[in-house]
Image: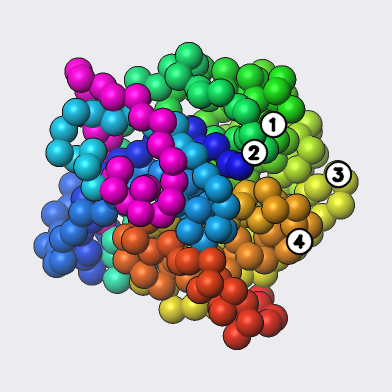
Amino acid sequence: MILVAGSANLDFVVRAAHIPAPGETVLGREFKTFPGGKGANQAVACARAGGATTQMLLALGSDAFAAPIEASLRDAGVALHIVRCVDEPTGTAFICVSDDAENAITVAPGANASLQPRDLPALTGVTHLLLQLETPLDSVTAFACRARAAGVTVVLNAAPAQALPAALLAAVDVLIVNKGELAAITKVPDDIDAALAPLDVPCVIVTLGAHGCRARDAGSVIEQPAFAVQAVDTTAAGDTFCGALVAALSEGAALARALRRASAAAAIACTRLGAQASIPTRDEVDAFLQSHPVPHG
């Protein structure tokens, strides 16, 4: 069983020709709201794209924004441990998606900032704990340390980018980062190999967008090319990758196979609008892999 502890937001998404530059006003087009937040997106991906038994610890406000988030998670089959906040609103994110599928995101954490170390539920039956950095860093560190002590595999998607305390890194079994996040952790920019060298984490996976991903696992390196798709919205692609990856690992899949499944799920998500709404089912991932036996790259 996978436990995801992390953020949940309601996303306010507007499409526009391009993302505004500082001081620029851009006239947008379609506007929709979608359940989102890195933690919730990854939980949906674990359950829907990965088919894994999944629970989630999250904090929500006592407002109308919480309802669609709860509904989306439950519809995906995620069991919820909700910390209900009376004094804080449900987290929100304001997202502009450009015609070339890039995005700019501003997050108002709200209730997510209220998640405390004491809120972590019992870890009985949990094999993997999946964490991100949209909730308080002290709480993330405490969750990771408690899980490591209980023999649970700790997976950290270190996003948004920031420096990490040594205690947190020491408790992580699998670290998932993009190039910017890797640089923020190691203070080594523009050189993946040099940045990976000092990281004392058993497995580190660096996502490279359209260039796929690279994993360093116990001294060996695995390269996974990206699948070529016509992207519509990349908002939840990274979260879909994380959730599908952990789901595959929780089933005992070898890392190379897990990376391929995660890359396929992320590719499908890029072809759809929205965060959780874009995450494919396990059957869709299977069908995609059958029709794309060799990824482009």
- The answer to which of marks 2 and 1 sits earlier in the sequence is 2
Q: Secondary structure at mark 2?
A: strand
The amino acid type of the residue labelled 4 equals Ala
Q: Residue 155, relative to residue 225: is it above or below?
A: above
The amino acid type of the residue labelled 1 equals Val
Q: CA distance from mark 2 to mark 1?
A: 6 Å
Given contact means CB atoms under 8 Å apart, are the residues at marks 2 and 1 in contact? yes
**Residue at coordinates 57% horizontally, 52% vertically from top-left?**
52
- Name the side, left or right, on which 103 lies relative to 49: left
Give the residue number, with chain letter if any, for mark 4. 256
Q: CA distance from mark 1 to mark 4?
A: 21 Å
- In this rendering, which labeled residue sits more in front, label 1 or label 3? 1
Give the residue number, with chain letter if any, for mark 1. 152
- In this rendering, which labeled residue sits more in front, label 2 or label 4? 2
Give the residue number, with chain letter if any, for mark 2. 128
The amino acid type of the residue labelled 3 equals Ala
Asked whether 222 falls inside the magenta stretch, the response is no
Q: Is residue 20 visible?
A: no
- Name the side, left or right, on which 151 lies relative to 52: right
- The answer to which of marks 1 and 3 sits earlier in the sequence is 1
| Number of marks in the rendered image | 4
Give the residue number, with chain letter if any, for mark 3. 218
Q: CA distance from mark 2 to mark 4?
A: 18 Å
**Farthest front residue?**
125
- The answer to which of marks 3 and 2 sits earlier in the sequence is 2
Q: What range is drawn magenta here?
A: 69-96
**Residue at coordinates 58% horizontally, 41% vertically from top-left?**
2
- The answer to which of marks 1 and 4 sits earlier in the sequence is 1
Q: Secondary structure at mark 3?
A: loop
